[in-house]
Image (cartoon, rainbow, N blue to C red):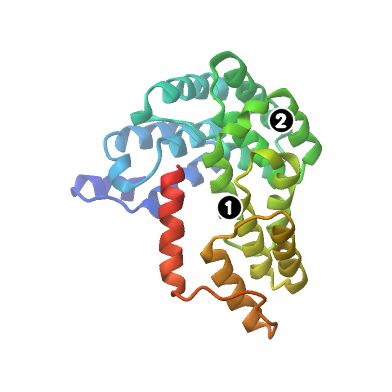
Amino acid sequence: MAVLKGTLDSGLLPSRPAVTALTQALAEKGDSKNLQALKNMLEDMTKSIGISASLIANAIALAHAKNNDLDAAVEYLEPLLISGAQNPDQAVRSISYLLRRVSEEGLEPALEKFGVMAERLASQFGIYRPVTDLFLQYVSADRVDDARSLIQRCGALVEEKRALVSFMARSASKPGQAKKIETLLELVPEHQDTEIAYHYLMRCYELDGDVASVKAVYEKTKEKNIQLHELSLKSLATFLKKVGEPVPFTEPPETFKFYVEEWRKRRLEAS
């Protein structure tokens, strides 16, 4: 905190990773007082640093949860989520960080309390992002029955397509995550952009080096008549050649970078 104050007093902006690390460390300690001070210090510069309004709000709620003051956490967070839905400029929308931390630390009463809040926001205010975050946390933690039960009570959460796609993209950025996307496809098959979902699923198996599963997913896309994006086909062709397997289609001719850029544009248009 002292270094941060010195940085700001010198007229400099701290880096995003530094502010994120400090925020999360204070949350883990349950230090809501210093988090509030941090929030005040950074009041007008969160956008310049590149941190979201949701990060500090999640951290303060987590600090309250760490101190076993769940009512204070909800009383602080709920109005921010309601006003965030109405004022996009200062939006506190996501509670995924908060839910992930309480889930990973086994703070089940906190997860339940925030879950009740998320469902209340959906049913009373039509605000679905928090309950979508809860659904995706259940998927992450392999709590499939909880996820299925939640979607039965609150089916409209599947309309938060941007959150679902971001979840798949994050899952496909490191090995061992394919089951999350498989679960998502099983739970909400009719609400997915299948081309995007299968792109990320195949990418997961490529990262795992799981040749049989990669080929099985490709066969499934053919059976279901899913038109894969050129980036998926380029990635698949590169993977198959690397493991010494034949490529059962004509490899797209452009560079990988070209198709990555195309994919990025498409995702921006979709969101």
Mark identifier at residue 123: none
Up/down of 82 relative to 240, above or below: above
Secondary structure category for the residue under label 1: helix
Camera-nearest residue between 10 and 188: 188
Instruction: Name the spot of residue 157 as percent of width and height, x first.
Output: 62, 30
Q: Is residue 92 left or right of residue 30?
A: left
Question: Residue tagged by mark 1?
Answer: 196
Instruction: Name the spot of residue 91 as percent of width and height, x first.
Output: 40, 30
Q: Which residue is the extreme one toward the right?
A: 145
Check the picture and name the quadrant holding the C terminus: top left
Up/down of 252 relative to 87, above or below: below
Q: Residue at x 48, y 31 (%)?
A: 93
Camera-nearest residue between 230 and 188: 230
- Crowd rating for badge 1 (residues with CA inside 10 Å; few <14, some 14–19, many 20+): some
Check the picture and name the quadrant holding the N terminus: top left
Q: Which residue is the extreme one toward the bottom?
A: 244
Residue 265 visible, this angle: yes
Residue 105 visible, this angle: no
Q: Residue at x 31, y 38 (%)?
A: 42
Q: Quadrant of residue 260?
A: bottom left
Q: Which residue is the extreme one toward the left?
A: 11
Q: Amino acid at mark 1?
A: Ile
Q: Quadrant of residue 137?
A: top right
Secondary structure category for the residue under label 2: helix
Instruction: Name the spot of residue 153 as percent of width and height, x first.
Output: 72, 23
Badge nearest the viewer, 2 or 1? 1
Question: Residue tagged by mark 2?
Answer: 151
Q: Residue at x 75, y 27 (%)?
A: 152
Upstream in sequence: badge 2 or badge 1 = 2
Q: Amino acid at mark 2?
A: Ile
